[in-house]
Image (tube, helix red, strand yellow):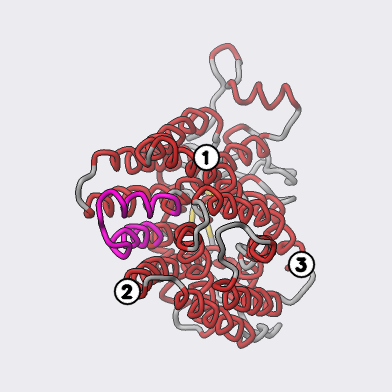
Amino acid sequence: MAFRPLVGGATRPETRLVTRFRLHPAWLVAAVAFVALVGAAGFRATPGVLLHPLHAEFGWPLATISAAVSVNLLLYGLTAPFAAALMDRFGIRRVVAGALVLVAAGSGLTVGMTESWQLVLCWGVLVGLGTGSMALAFVATVTGRWFVERRGLVTGVLTAGGAAGQLVFLPLLALLVRDHGWRTAALVVAGAALAVVPLVVWLLREHPADLGRPAYGATEVVPPARPAGGAASRAVGALAAAARTRPFWLLAGGFAICGATTNGLVGTHFVLAAHDHGMPETTAAGLLAVVGLFDIAGSIASGWLTDRVDARLLLGAYYALRGASLLVLPSLFAGTAEPSMLVFIVFYGLDWVATVPPTVALCREWFGASGAVVFGWVFAAHQFGAALAATGAGLVRDRLGDYALAWYVAGALSIGAAGLSLLLRRRAADEPAFALPPTSPRSPCR
């Protein structure tokens, strides 16, 4: 939708706000995007503190509850490649506002559920689709449209918004569950999602050209461009072409293990695993919040290193060190947060999404201009691995009574992911990169 001056030459409120503080509007857009991403990450962190209360109240097996989390994680990943298509067709504001409403509906409706299938529908489908529309494809869309300079830095900061979401929401949700019950926590999540919607509708603009401005760091106002052909068909075409290459499967395999060992296992089951050893759930949730805090530093530092060090070596090191830490984790659980556990938490936080910048760089190296689209599918593999781990760890806990086997398997898989990363060779200078058809300009008016 094109930007048009109001009657009498007046400007929109958000334009006056930006002018007053002499900021490029790109920074305001990035700030609003960060708030939405923080919220989305907080909503995805909710299952970690609700597993035990739901199990205690309804008597559902942990594997059944974890299945709802798995559906959520899977849809979160599968939505990512198509989210950009929706944003191109309907606009960023409409898609993000609609996604927040879906999250609010999914979280709010859980308070009246009585059957496990309703949990799958609310947590799995509604919240999964909503948060998936605000995943890394949203980050790529915002930074691609609004930034030329500082694009890498802004991408790292927005990606770290996921860590901030954990930091803000997890301790609060754990306290609400302890003092007021899980239904209050679910309603707080729904209210927080709805509270962000007006901010998105008011300030989240579509393109710099809509305001008559160039992107940050650019010198010319460039009309929005649309891919040749439908964006959804391009996403599917990118998958079909990339899937015929060895680098895609090495990257997707490693990233699937990344998802299994972060969102799927630690993010979903760490609180209950710690509680099994006598640690209060609020303490365990606080430890995951610390993971989120150090994740911010780790993701930004990894982006800096990716500009200077071979991305394959970085991924190999990240996965190998993660595997070693998971192999020793079962011996660190105790009724209190011992120093050895704090060391694990700090290390795991630094490593949590450190894999994202080198993975994006390798997708760009091998798949050229279509690297972002291919990364969307690699990210879908990440969430597929997370979904398998969420359900698998729940089954292990139900059958064996503890999570030890899940931690050991995850550690071994992480070491395997290091091997996959090191098998990925460097693309030769004269070797063409896979690319999608070029984009074509369009009028900023729809």
Quick one: 151 or 260, which is closer to the camera? 260
- The residue under the point 46% across, 32% down is 197
- Look at discs 1 and 2 and give the one toward the viewer: 2
- Name the amino acid type tagged 3: Leu
- The residue under the point 37% across, 48% down is 127
Residue 254 point in image, percent of width and height: 54, 77
Which residue corresponds to mark 1? 172
Picture quarter with the C terminus = top left
- The residue under the point 68% across, 50% down is 154
CB atoms at circles 3 and 2 under 8 Å apart?
no
> Helix, strand, or loop for circle 1?
helix
Magenta highlight range: 48-73
> Helix, strand, or loop for circle 3?
helix
Task: Inspect this view and state whether residue 194 appears.
Answer: yes
- Name the amino acid type tagged 1: Leu
> Helix, strand, or loop for circle 2?
helix
Upstream in sequence: badge 3 or badge 1: 1
Which residue corresponds to mark 3? 305
The image shows residue 121, relative to residue 339, as above or below, that is: above
- Name the amino acid type tagged 2: Arg
- In the image, which disc is placed on residue 255? none
Which residue corresponds to mark 2? 399
